[in-house]
Amino acid sequence: MLQNISAGLSAIRAANVGLAVTSNNIANQATPGFVRSTVDLATRPPINMHGFSIGTGVEVAGIRRVHDEALDAAITQNTSESGAVEQQLQLMQRLENALASGDADLSASLDRLFNSLTELSVQPDDLVRRSEAIRAFQQVAADFNDVSATVDSIREGVNEQIQADVDQINALASELSDVTAQIQDANNRRIPARDLENRRGQLLNELAGFIEVQLNPKDDTIMLAGGSALIGGRNFQPLEAVYQGDRTIVVRQGEASALNIQGGSLGGLMAMQDARLVDFQANLDTLAQQLMISFDTVHATGLGIDGTVTQLQSQRTVEDVTLPLADVLSLPITAGELYLSVTDSATNETEMHAIAIDPELDSLEDLATRITTDISGLQAIANPDAGSLTILAAQGLSFNFTGSPGNRPAGVAALTGTSEPSVSGLPDDGRNRNLSLQFSDNGQIGVTADLRLEVRDSGGALLEVHEIGAGYEPGTPIEITGGLSVQLSPGTVVAGEQVQVASVGSPDSSGILSALGIGSLFTGHDARTIQVAEHIVDNPFAFATSLTGEVGDTWNLQRMLDLRDADLLGPGTTLNDAVGDLVAGVGHEVASLQDTAEHLGMVGDSLNSQRDSISGVDVNEELVKMLQYQRLFQTAARFLSTVDELTADLLNII
Amino acid sequence: MLDRVPSSYFTSLAMQQTRMRGASLGRLQEQLATGMRVNRPSDDPATMASLLAHQSTVSRMESEVETIQFAKTYLEGGVSGLLEVEDLMVAVKRIVGDSKQSSEPDVLAQELGHIMDRLGEVANRQIDGRYIFAGIATNRQPFELNEDGVMEYGGAITGTHTRVATSINVYVNTGGQEIFASRDRAETRISGTTGAAAGSGVDTAEQWNTLQVRHTATSFAAGSGVQSGSSVDQDSIIGPPGAHVLTIVNNNTDGQSGTVSLNGGAAIPFTSADTDLRLSGPHGELLHLDFSSLTSGFSGTVDITADGTMSIDGGVTEVPITFEDNQQLVGPDGRITFVDSTQIRREGDDTVEYVGVPTLFETLEMMRETLANKSDYSETEWVDRINHLADEVDRHADVIYTHIGRLSLASENLDAVQFRHEDVMLQTKEAISNLASADIAEVVLQMQNEQNSLNYAYASTARLFDTSLLDFIR
């Protein structure tokens, strides 16, 4: 009889346990990450009674968390990847807004800039149009500044977020470490740790949102993607975010080297910091630099319409005036020549001088010395404190970098004939040529038959021959190679005598003017610092639209307009194309991140659905179980009551 | 398909659908509100790149159309000015025509003066305070009277040019020199009686000069005994040996008298007592002869050599005549004139006119002076000179017509560019619309679909939650 009571009792106990588990499942049906439990019932061992093996009831073999470890790991992985992508997406969308739909619409600003130059070309002396053009330049510069400021702001936000994420990861890891220790203690004491494991699962997923982690259930370690342990047993190795330089943060553990953080929002932040923002800023800087170099080169080799230049100071400075220029300039410079034209305002005669520059060897001081030494009437000063170069013309002289040869060729003074050659015009291409003009015979200009002017290149090769004897009207311009014209005054010439003419289409083949910002339109050296030179903003007539200084001269303006269609940023890539690429590039990245985020979201939804199908609480199912345990309890109670009645009947017999 | 579908699945599915449909509805609402399918680069990066390029094209063309309109203002101002000049040229030609019959050339000269004033006004015309015939020196009055009272060009040679399309440059103004002071030097014209002609060299002298040809010495071939008379300095013949020939016919009565003629002209009598006999040739050339040493009984011809000088600077520099085809003379301004002296046969003052060289102002000034000083010329000389100046006026008129044509053509080309730009703008805007504009009907339908889907999701979720075992547990 007693065994019957025992069996009934076991059923009541089992029903109690079942109801308790069910009630917990029902209570946690809305708890995120909750893993339902199920009660495993088993028959108790039989006893031998009267030669028969009789069952002794039921027992709770265990309470099991219903979950799939592989699925949990996949969800953790998905959480981590989603965290990284969403973090990047959010930041890239900020960049996208700043670039294309905010105030800084670079593409439109560049269009406005070139449009204003086109409109200025009709009325180059108009102050309003000049001011508009300068404002357009300022707007482009401001757009570069704004986009850079946005990048900086994002970067600062990223840095702050990295710090916050690291703090959050450490807090979560600390809690996770405690929970893991409790699980280990419970396991050691063979106490079920289902709720703790649930909590650990929740924390792990939460952590995965910040950083890619992986749980090794065999030894309860939680590993980072790079292979180092965040939590090893009961030990927790906190992360530390430290600045490396002014702007870059690295994450490390203790004194170890920087971790290669992947996944999670921290992984996303690190990817933004180390790659996306860096690449974007580099592209933006390249664009701004190319804009500055291109316009500065043209501007420096032109003339404003406010008179001649007697003094210029470099807008860009060097740290050390004694070091080679290549080592101290932020904008590119190559070996080449700089042509300076010096004009005597009394005689209006111009002399052109070429200064050779080797940036690998020459310092700013060397350059200053060379200008002062080689060019009479000019003084160049390299200021070691300011790191700048100042060029001063002597009283009565002015200078420019237009490559204008003046009208007096070199060597005229040495001619023994009475005819005097003069030069006019502008080079028709970007090439520099040193030409010699040689007389073929003794004779008289415009009189002697078969008298010719032979034009030779610097190597002595004969390029062209022009009749200057009978049939030539002295003083008539003769167009020669390179676009210049030569006029010969009446008089005699002597066979073999020659003069030299420099046809300079590229007055600064070294790039020194733009690199140092001499006569430049812009100041600054990248997208963050680009500005229109203050003296041009203050005086729009200093904007170098001409090559002659005449108010209606638009030759230099046309050279600026040429930049609109020039492949400044690679084959087939204009400034506008590059801005379009930059904008579309960010758009592509955002769209790609959106696609990835959407894909990961769908995968996550699918994984969570699968997880829910395994581990989720189905209330109806729990209610059925509840009814089942209720019935078990009720029948066991009824059985015990029956056994009790039988027992009472037996006792009444006594 | 899941084997086990817990109630939480319904919840998460409902939330997922709400999120997805909400996002989709948000995008559609934005498209409806803005009318644009592409509102940011990430909406369609490839399209956004095309959009930027198209928008840039439209912006550029709008600006270039505006520039064209400004440029046309200047070009049409130039054309208008030159049409006025054309009218003035017609008036000048009328004056030329009238002058040949007029008995009051002074009045015509005065009228021409007024025309010159109007011409000066046109040449210095401004638009918006900018001189339209000053080239790139738009702030400088291009034509001003110099110290000689002649209009002189002080503007620039080249004009201001603008760009109205890739590689299409248009000059919006012109240097006045090539319009009003154009040159097309032709062979120099020397008119007069000396026999001088233009040399083969290319002159540099401008406007006009007077070529002074002067006799310096006369000599006779040996044999006749004839010598120059005492008034030899009044001889006017010039020529190399044999160019002039003296023909002596002795009457053989005493061997000391007879007749003498020059170059086949009228013979006059002489005796050996004549020491300064004045003899004229058929062309008015003069010779003074001394017959005191005549070889008795000489009859026959005597070759004469008559030397002379030329000067083109008023006699300051006298160049011996060498009877060559390209003698060089230097004018008062240092400019050169080449003279063919091979046919110079008498002294005199010839007019040297440098054809194709005088500016329009100089031509008109010369014409005015010629009209005003008609009496200083012989009728033939005067007509000849007026005709020559009329030719110069015609040359300038041709230049004016050419420039009117050029400026008009430039203006027409700008019109064509403007029309083309407007077409391209229209097409590009259409392309932008096709690329970026939202198809409202399609968006509305999509929105309806999304709303329906969301409604179904909500309805099915609510319905599923309606079914619960709780309803059956008593």
Image (spheres, grey):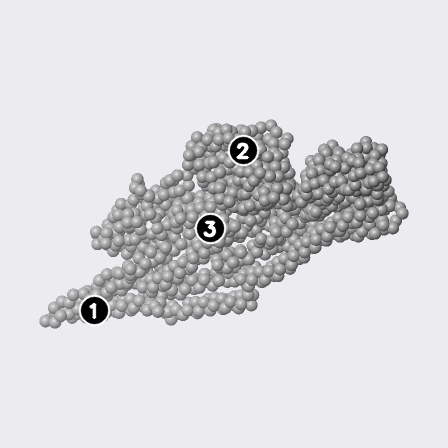
Image coordinates of residue B193 in percent, x first then y, are 78, 43
Image coordinates of residue A475 in percent, x first then y, are 64, 41
The residue beneath circle 3 is A570
The residue beneath circle 2 is A313
Question: In the drawing, does residue A61 fall left or right of residue A439?
Answer: left
Question: Is residue A144 shown above or below A631?
Answer: above
Q: Which corner quadrant of the image does residue A449 belong to?
A: top right
Say which residue appears at 35% left-offset and 59% top-offset: A28
Q: Which corner quadrant of the image does residue A7 belong to?
A: bottom left
Residue A302 appears in the figure = yes
- Residue sitting nearer the eye, A446 or A39: A446
Which numbered disc, 2 or 3, marks the residue that appears first in the sequence?
Answer: 2
Residue B207 appears in the figure = no
Question: Is residue A95 shown above or below A419?
Answer: below
- Residue sitting nearer the eye, A398 or B209: B209
Contact? badges 3 and 1 (CB < 8 Å): no
Image coordinates of residue B279 in percent, x first then y, are 83, 39
